[in-house]
Image (tube, grey):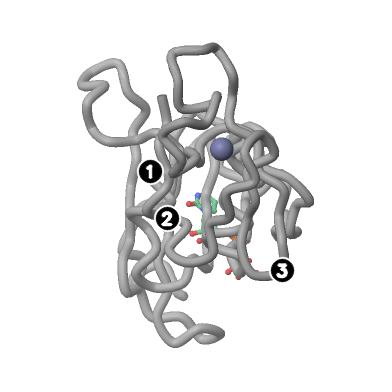
């Protein structure tokens, strides 16, 4: 894309999550715990939706200023937006570019739908799911989530 077509401006330091399947940007923001409630303390976040892409037709893109992602965030992202690429930006340059790999387990961020699960009680137990071919399984109570993983994102 040439500069005069840029819809979302470049960032100086932070993370660009690119090639997100169109329609998934809001789920990506949820994974990152960005819901606008931080007010003036939050990072600057830019979102492009339905941006034309040679490779994908249309794509979404999320740019987070001043922040690199944690491994737990990257792991859940791999499940929700498997085609995404993660670009670490330092002083306006792309310092690192990563494709996502399907993890074997994900910790935190997703919440178990079983209200009797230890991870949904007032205990300090973080959720942990084994990644299956077609879903994820809670490692504490064996509940399986197969469809609409995004509906189970809950960042505390
Ligand atoms: N980007 C940004 N701010 C910067 C540098 C890059 O927001 N200071 C964004 C670009 O707009 C692009 C992504 O980070 O969406 C990756 O940048 P780059 O690797 O330069 O673009 P491409 O070569 O098009 O990436 P790819 O090969 O992954 O498609
Ligand atoms: Zn559970």
Q: Is residue 134 above or below residue 26?
A: below
Residue 124, x across and y down, in percent: 55, 12
Q: Is residue 122 above or below residue 47?
A: above
Crowd band around label 2 with a 10 angstrom C-alpha radius: few (<14), some (14–19), many (20+): some
Looking at the image, which residue is at 61% across and 62% down? 135
Q: Residue furthest front?
A: 116
Crowd band around label 3 with a 10 angstrom C-alpha radius: few (<14), some (14–19), many (20+): few
Q: Earlier in the sequence, mark 1 or mark 2?
A: 1
Residue nearer the viewer, 54 or 33:
33
- Please indicate whether residue 45 sits to the left or right of residue 76 in the image: left
Instruction: Give the residue number, with chain letter if any, for mark 3.
Output: 133
Residue 91, x across and y down, in percent: 58, 35
The answer for how far apart the CA atoms under marks 1 and 3 are is 23 Å
Looking at the image, which residue is at 33% across and 61% down? 48
* Residues at discs 2 and 3 in contact (Cβ within 8 Å): no
Residue 86, x across and y down, in percent: 62, 52
Instruction: Give the residue number, with chain letter if any, for mark 1.
Output: 30
Q: Secondary structure at mark 2?
A: helix
Q: Secondary structure at mark 3?
A: loop
Q: Residue furthest right?
A: 104
The answer for how far apart the CA atoms under marks 1 and 2 are is 9 Å
Q: Quadrant of ligand 1?
A: bottom right
Q: Secondary structure at mark 1?
A: helix
* Residues at discs 1 and 2 in contact (Cβ within 8 Å): yes
Crowd band around label 1 with a 10 angstrom C-alpha radius: few (<14), some (14–19), many (20+): some
Residue 150: give its label.
Answer: 2
Q: Is residue 131 above or below residue 148?
A: above
Residue 4, x across and y down, in percent: 34, 70
Residue nearer the viewer, 104 or 33:
104
Residue 7: quarter of image: bottom left
Q: Earlier in the sequence, mark 2 or mark 3?
A: 3
* Residues at discs 1 and 3 in contact (Cβ within 8 Å): no
């Amino acid at each position: 894309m040439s500069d005069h077509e840029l819809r979302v401006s470049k960032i100086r330091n932070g993370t660009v999550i690119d090639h997100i399947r169109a329609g998934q940007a809001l789920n990506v923001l949820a994974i990152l715990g960005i819901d606008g409630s931080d007010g003036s303390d939050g990072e600057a976040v830019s979102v492009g939706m339905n941006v034309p892409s040679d490779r994908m037709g249309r794509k979404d893109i999320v740019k987070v200023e001043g922040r690199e992602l944690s491994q737990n965030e990257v792991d859940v992202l791999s499940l929700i937006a498997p085609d995404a690429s993660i670009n670490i930006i330092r002083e306006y340059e792309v310092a690192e570019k990563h494709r996502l790999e399907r993890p074997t387990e994900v910790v935190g961020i997703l919440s178990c739908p079983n209200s009797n699960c230890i991870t949904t009680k007032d205990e300090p137990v973080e959720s942990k799911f084994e990644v299956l071919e077609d879903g994820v399984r809670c490692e504490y109570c064996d509940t399986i989530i197969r469809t609409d993983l995004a509906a189970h994102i809950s960042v505390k």
